[in-house]
Every structure is written in C-alpha cells, then in structure tokens.
Amino acid sequence: MSAQAIFSVSGLTKRFAEGEAEVLVLKGIDLSMTAGEMTALLGPSGSGKSTLLTILGTLMRASGGTHEMLGVDLMQASEAQRTEFRSKHLGFVFQFHHLLSDLSALENVMMPAASAAGRETPAMRERAMELLDAVGLPDRMNYRPSAMSGGQRQRVAVARALINNPVLVLADEPTGNLDRQSADQVMDLIRSINQTMATSFLISTHDEHIAAQCSRRIELLDGRIIRS
Amino acid sequence: MNPYAVKLAIRHLLSHPGQTALLMAGVALGVSVFIFMSALIGGLATLLTLRTVGSIPHIVLEMPDRDPATLSPNAHKHVVLQKDLSRRDQIAIWQPVIPIIEQTSGVTAVSPQIRGSAFVERGQTVAPVGVIGVMPGKLSDIANIEAAIVDGSSNLPADGILIGSRLARDLGLRVGQVIRLSSDRGRTRSFRIGGIFTLGIASADRQAVYMNFTTARALYDLSTGISRIEIKVEPATDAADIAERLRRSTGLKATAWTEDNAQLFEGLDAQARTGTIIKAFSLVTIIVGIASAMLLSIVRRQSEIGIMRAMGASNGLVISIFVLEGTLIGFIGAIVGAVAAWFALLPLPPVTEVSSGGLPIDRQQGDFLLAITLTTLAATLASILPARRAARIDPVEAIGA
Ligand SMILES: Nc1ncnc2c1ncn2[C@@H]1O[C@H](COP(=O)(O)OP(=O)(O)O)[C@@H](O)[C@H]1O
Ligand SMILES: [Mg+2]
C-alpha cells in the first residue's frame, strides 16, 4: 500500500442470497486508489460495478476481505461510524440525479451538509453557490429540479456530491442517462474539478468514450478485475 | 427540534398545497365533529338537567324512617306492626332547624311544607290530589308557581287554592269556582279556586293543589309540626353532598333529587357514552387518514429518502421530518376545524332559550382545547409508524444503484 492511498481493499467478496442459492457477485477484489486519481471502472452490465461502488461508498457491507480508508477499518466500523464517515469523506453521483423535488438547486447542493449539521448555515450557502458556479449553473440556484434539463440536474448532483469536500467521489454511470453532449459537459466538469480541487473520482461506465477521459482504467468482468 | 427537519417538513407541505389542504380539511372536519358532539351532548345534559331541576326540590328533609316496633318479643310469637307507608311522621320541632339549613352553603331557598293527600269532588267525579301547604311568600321558592299562573292570581287567602291546568280541564273547573276538598284525615272544607297554573310537568299539573300553610295545618290536624322541608341549592349538581351535610346537621332524612332521578343520570350517561364513541371514531378517522396519506407519501418519495440516507441523514432526521409533517397537518387542521366550529356554533341560541325542535348546543361545552390537543396527539401518533418505516428504507434499494 503506497503512502498516499486513500482507500484499499483486498480479497473483497460479496455474495447475495438468491432464494435458496447464493450468488458470488464480487470474487476477490484487490484495489487501491491514490489521492487525485480519476479512475474509470469499466465492465459490461452485470459485472459488479455498482456493487463494488456501493461497498466502497459504505452503503453496503462486503461479505469478506478487507476494506480500509483514510486509516479507518470500515469492515469493523459500526453502522453509525460508517454513516458519519460517509457524510464526511465520500460523495456520490448516481445514474439518476435523485434530487429532492421540493428543494431548489442551491438547497439540494446544501442537503448533505445541512443533514449532518441539522441546519443550513450561511457558510454552506456560500460553498453551495461556489459549487453551482463551478458546475456552470450560477443562474439556476433557485430553480427546482423539475425546471431544469437532465444535464443541468446531473451537474447539480455533481455539485451536491462535493459539498462536504469529500476525498473521493463515487460516480455510478453518471452520464448513463444523458445525451452525448450533456454527457461530455458532465465529464468535462468532473475532470476540471479533479484537477482544481484534487478530488479523486471513481467512475463506473461501460462507455469507452467516457473511460478515455480518465487517468486510469480498471476493467471488471464477472466479479473479478481483469485489467488494471 | 432539528431546524432542518422543520424546514423540510414545512417545505414538503407547501410544495403540495392541494394535498396538504385536503388532508387538513379532513382533519378539520373530524375536529368539528368532535366539537359539535361535545357541545350537543353537553347542551342536552344541561337542558335536561335544567328542565328536571327547575321545578322540583333539590333536597327534601323529612323525619327519618322508624322501623316498626316489635310487639311481645318472645321466642315463639313474633308480632310485627306493618310499616305505614302512606304517612310519615311530622317534623315536630322545625323552627330551630330552619336557620341551620339557611346557613348551609349552597342552599338558596328553604320551604317548610305541610303535605297530604286529598280528594276533590265535583259532581260524580272524584280526583285524587296532593295538597301542598306553603308559607306566605314561599309559594314560588321551589317551583315557580307565580310565573306559571295561566288564569287568575297567585294570592292564597285562607280559603283559596291554586290548581293545575290538567286538573282544571279534567274536572271542568274555572277560576272563582268553589270546590270541596276532603283530606285523608277525614276533614272536608270548601275552597275557592284563586288561580290555575301550568308547570309543564304532567303530575304537578294534574295533582298539585297549593294552599295557605295555616289552612293546610287545619286540614291535616297538625297543630305545630310540618311534613317536610323542601330546599333548593346552587349548583343543583351538588345536591347529594349538601344533602349529606344537612342530614348530619339536622338529623333529618335528606333526599337529594339525584336519588330520585337515577333514570335521568343513566340517560345522560348513555348519551355521553354515545358522544364519546362518536368522538373516538372521529379521532380514529383522523389517525387512519393521516397514517395512510403519510404511507403513500413515503412510498412516493422512497428514492428521495434513500438519497438523504445515503448522503448522511440520520434515522432521527428522517423520522423527525415525517412526524413533524403529520403533526403539522393535525395541528393546523385542528385549529382550522376549531375556528370553523366556533363560528358555526356562534349564532345558535343559548341552551336555556332553545325552542322545541331545535338542537340544544352549548358552545361553552365544545371542548375546543381538548379537541385540538387530542387531534394533534392523534396526528403525531399516526405519523410515527410511517416515519419509522421511512427511516428503515435501504438507500441502496431505494436508489436502485
Ligand atoms: N441485491 C442483490 N441481490 C441479488 N443479486 C444482486 C443484487 N444486487 C446485484 N445483484 C447481482 O449482482 C450482479 C452485479 O450487479 P451490479 O453490481 O449491479 O452490476 P453492474 O452495475 O456492473 O451492472 C448482477 O448479476 C446482479 O443481478
Ligand atoms: Mg450498475
């Protein structure tokens, strides 16, 4: 494990009970990422990309192996510790934006920080405005998600993932639901954030075009890393 | 309270004004049913009580029952005199008792009376009546006879009597006529009908005959004693307690009106129970309504809840948001319903002035605060289960990642 690794997993497995039978979805993953990396996770549908991201994001526990991040043993950590860890150090972008429909773009960006603090603060507002500026939506702060395009919503979702200044953003097919032009905009945005804010990204995709814009690529097939 | 939970709860309610208004309107309706039932049941009880206690004594003092003497108490023969149920002993020494009664707190009127049975004869018809001999100036202390006079006057000269309108009609009697009255003591005297009254109580209007205290004395051979002391108290519902105090202070038998009107109280109780059931149903309706609306809303917002959980919202925050939403719907709906009920009941006449056929609704007994409190509590209760369900939503499943 190199000195600047932000997370590392080894021998990571995940099995799901499928009725009577058990399915082994991740079959021993060894992987680590260093700060500032922008990594593409490639693989066909059903290869285990989402499962791996979900485990790395502490939204689900692995069945076996080790999982360590920023010096914390996440296999041993309690659910409350994992929740706190997640809100402090991890950001998420999903295929669907999942913005809260009752909140404006600005309020949506503040949501992860406000949830943790129990209130919205002027500092959060300030930071959220900077982020919306950074994702190119300074004039959409007070729009509800329903009044924005798909690409705009996904850019708000990227800004939301960044509000707590995470070390790592896990993006599960962030452009999977966008047209080519919007997808490129979102990828440009992610790349510039990766460069200016030194935030690491792990982006799952089955799109070579997306993977080409990343600094590193990992290929997953049937629950195993086949190329790294 | 978590300010962010408050913000999100209010924001959601405001973002769906139609649904929020509909829910609140439902709650408001339930609350007004609750208030309406309280006011109606309370008003009915007040009206029936007022009607009942208005013309009757609240407490009657008489000589205590004396068990009949046992004659020749030996083991082989046991002779017992049968108790004379028709006559009660007179209260021989009553003057000193009157001030004691008058000074008892709660007592508002005291009327010593001579009571007895008699027959009125007119031609072939004979009608049984109950004679009430009242002291001068105390004619209207128990039943308001003066106000009930429909013909003649309420003066009671030595040979004058007042009779009820039913008796007058049955016997074809008019004011000014002279009739003969025979007491169960065998004394017969002629009286001139001075006035006819309608109390609205059938038994009194058919049987009561009021006369001068002194005249009644002669008719019943009572030289100094009296038959009973009738008392009015305020409030009438305290009669039982006051009767108990009078029994101890005077040694007389004290009967409160509540003892003789058990049926009324049973009726009022049954009514109150009916009201409670209807009120409980309106609360249950509110609970079911809010709970199902919240459950629906949670199913619809599953992925939003999931994303919040994924991004660091605690279980407590999610529960707070939904409990707050339900509570706000309940509280605001309750206020709206209570205010609406208040204004709806405002033009209704007071219970004492309800015309026959009208509903005796007493706004004072509407239990507004209780309705608001219970409804808000019910709403909170109704949202706890859905809220806990929301908190259990698995972010991974909800997001469908
Ligand atoms: N909760 C689950 N229960 C059972 N099987 C699952 C579950 N989640 C994922 N799988 C299975 O795991 C495999 C990998 O799924 P996923 O990680 O979503 O792949 P990808 O994101 O690469 O398409 C699939 O075969 C899927 O059916
Ligand atoms: Mg997937």
Image (cartoon, rainbow, N blue to C red):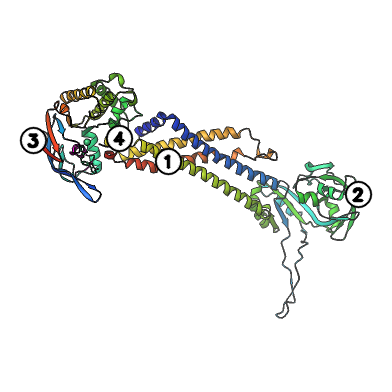
Spot occupied by residue A64 in the image (x, y as percentages of width and height): 16, 46
Q: Which label number is shown at residue B178?
A: 2
Q: Earlier in the sequence, mark 1 or mark 4?
A: 1
Q: Nearer the viewer, mark 1 or mark 3?
A: 1
The span from disc 1 to disc 3 (Cα, nearest Å) is 54 Å
Q: Which residue, given by chain and number where applicable, does mark 3 sit on? A: A2
- Going by the numbered disc 3, the residue's amino acid type is Ser
Quadrant occupied by the C terminus of chain A = top left
- Residue B163 seen by the camera: yes
Spot occupied by residue B222 in the image (x, y as percentages of width and height): 83, 58
- Going by the numbered disc 4, the residue's amino acid type is Met
Q: Residues within 10 Å of mark 4 (few under 14, many from 20)?
A: many
Q: Chain of mark 2?
A: B
Spot occupied by residue B92 in the image (x, y as percentages of width and height): 78, 59
Q: Earlier in the sequence, mark 4 or mark 2?
A: 2
Q: Quadrant of ligand 2?
A: top left
User: At 14% from the left edge and 25% from the top edge, which residue is drawn?
Assistant: A213
Q: Which label number is shown at residue B292?
A: 1
Q: Is B226 placed left or right of A200 in the picture? A: right
Label 4: state its secondary structure.
Answer: helix
